[in-house]
Amino acid sequence: MKKRKAEPEEVWAAAFCYVLAPVLLSYVLWVLEDALESGKKRLYFLARDGCMMYRMAEYLCRQWGIPLECRYLYCSRYALRSGEYGLLGDKCLDYICLGGMEVTLEKMMERGGLTAEEVSAAGERMGWESRMRKCLSYEQVKALKPQLKDNSFFMEKLLEHSKEAYPSVSGYLRQEGLLEEISYAIVDSGWTGSVQRSINRLLGSAGYDRAVEGYYFGLYEYVEGVEPEHYRTWYFAPENRNIRKAFFCNNLFECVFSSPEGMTKGYCRKEGRFEPVFAMEENPNRRRIEAAAGLLLRYVKRYAAGEGKGMPVKEKGFSIKEKSISGKHGAGTQEKEWFGKKEQREMERRTAFRLLASFMGRPSAAEARVFGSYVFDDDVTGEERRTVARAFTPEEVKEGRLFRRLFRYAAGGEHPAVQSAWPEAGMVLADAAGSTALYKFLLYSKKSLEQRKRNRKRKE
């Protein structure tokens, strides 16, 4: 008898129920446990990747009576940096000259908040009128930094717009309580943690003298000038877990765990309060995001009620009970045992790797088609429109082969300007053999060694 082909909706639901929901819940449980033990009183979940984490955490804290306040902070790299540029001067070009998928000079200037007319005028001063939308490689993007610095019109407009944005950006952070004398941390997906540095710099300019701490699903690297001890990671960190990085796709993570609203582009004042302004009316993936949020909430409700099975697993006989503890909270303090044994957290991480490595690193053709159709926003402006995965062309398959990539990297050649947001799915959709995992593992291993050297040097 011929086996029935699964419908797209079934493929989607199965991945959420058996992979994505348990993995995200495990991360949220770890955040709540660590925050509670370190004396945090409040957690800020950052838009948009933190939306579903926030809903899970808020429900668990309310249902179990966990003394942690959960808040949702509307922000983005673009919104925060718009107010931060003026504090940096020329150094703001480090943000402007970042690589990505299909980066153009036009997009680089838009990162600085320039209008379409100002972008055109600034491009003319560089003699780039006919090349504003030409896709640039990472090396070409970096090479434009001195030219942008010497473009007085561009720098003047960038800093002018930043000065205009600063009052609303800092005003929103103050309104949401980030300058209050309370122990708190931010929670996000991660990758570099640059938002945390931006928040610290903005708060510091407003007189806040504490270092904001952050929780992250994973970090590939630390941005320059930060203290690594203020960045807590669950799944992987810059110094380690390279095999996990090799079979992970952060772009897909952002797509499936996003929020219904569009990216926060800035803030405006309405009736005495600062409100977020969005780059678009709604997330183009809104329908699936809302369905996922409902599924995740049902999942966490069953877990909170003691019905959780699989991963994460509550130990047999688990209950929320009073226990006497000692230490930083004081001897004899009564606290609830919400999370079971600590050994469970590491077991959940290992299980998460098996699940994510299969789903993200070696997707089935059905998974590649269904999840590859999510619309992806690569640039900080949040106005991109492409699917997270598409079938590679024969030439792209050839260019993606391990030895060709290693040869190009060793020779110092330029990387292709057009890249894939989920290359593993691109190979599957092209019905091509091969994997990017080994190349990614070697690349991340090299970066990890460099990070460990920096850590040792910093401690000396």
Image (cartoon, rainbow, N blue to C red):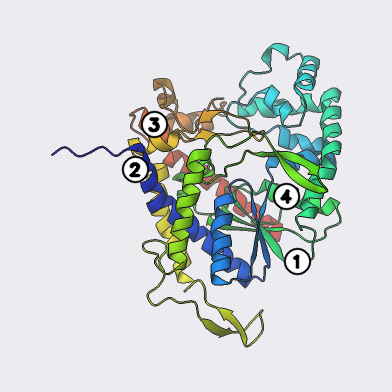
Residue 97 shows up from this direction: yes
Which of the two labelled residues, at mark 1 and mark 2, occupies the earlier sequence position? 2
Q: Are marks 4 and 2 in contact (CB under 8 Å)?
A: no
At x 75%, y 21%, the residue is 116
User: Disc 2 marks which amino acid?
Assistant: Glu
Residue on which disc 1 sits: 182
Q: Quadrant of residue 312?
A: bottom left
Side of 50 where 292 appears, left or right: left
Residue farthest toward the bottom in the current orientation of the protein:
332
| Residue on which the image places disc 4 | 197
Where is residue 412 drawn, in percent x and y? 57, 29
- Which labelled disc corresponds to residue 120? none
Query: What is the C-alpha distance between the residues marked 1 and 2?
Result: 45 Å
Instruction: Give left or right: position of 428 versus 328.
Output: left
**Identity, as a three-letter code, of the amino acid under mark 3:** Met
Viewed as shown, does residue 281 lie left or right of 358? Answer: right
Residue that appears at 69% across and 29% down: 142
Where in the figure is residue 454, as x and y percent of width and height?
66, 52
| Disc ID at residue 427 | 3
Report how far apart the C-alphas of labels 2 and 3 lie in the structure: 23 Å
Q: Earlier in the sequence, mark 3 or mark 1?
A: 1
Which quarter shows the N terminus?
Answer: top left
Q: Which mark is residue 10?
A: 2
Q: CA distance from mark 4 to mark 2?
A: 41 Å
Mark whose residue sits in front, 4 or 1: 1
Which quadrant of the figure contains the C terminus? Answer: bottom right
Q: Nearer the viewer, mark 2 or mark 3?
A: 2
Q: Is residue 63 above or below residue 158?
A: below
Residue 133 image offset from top left, x and y in percent? 65, 18
Q: CA distance from mark 3 to mark 4?
A: 36 Å
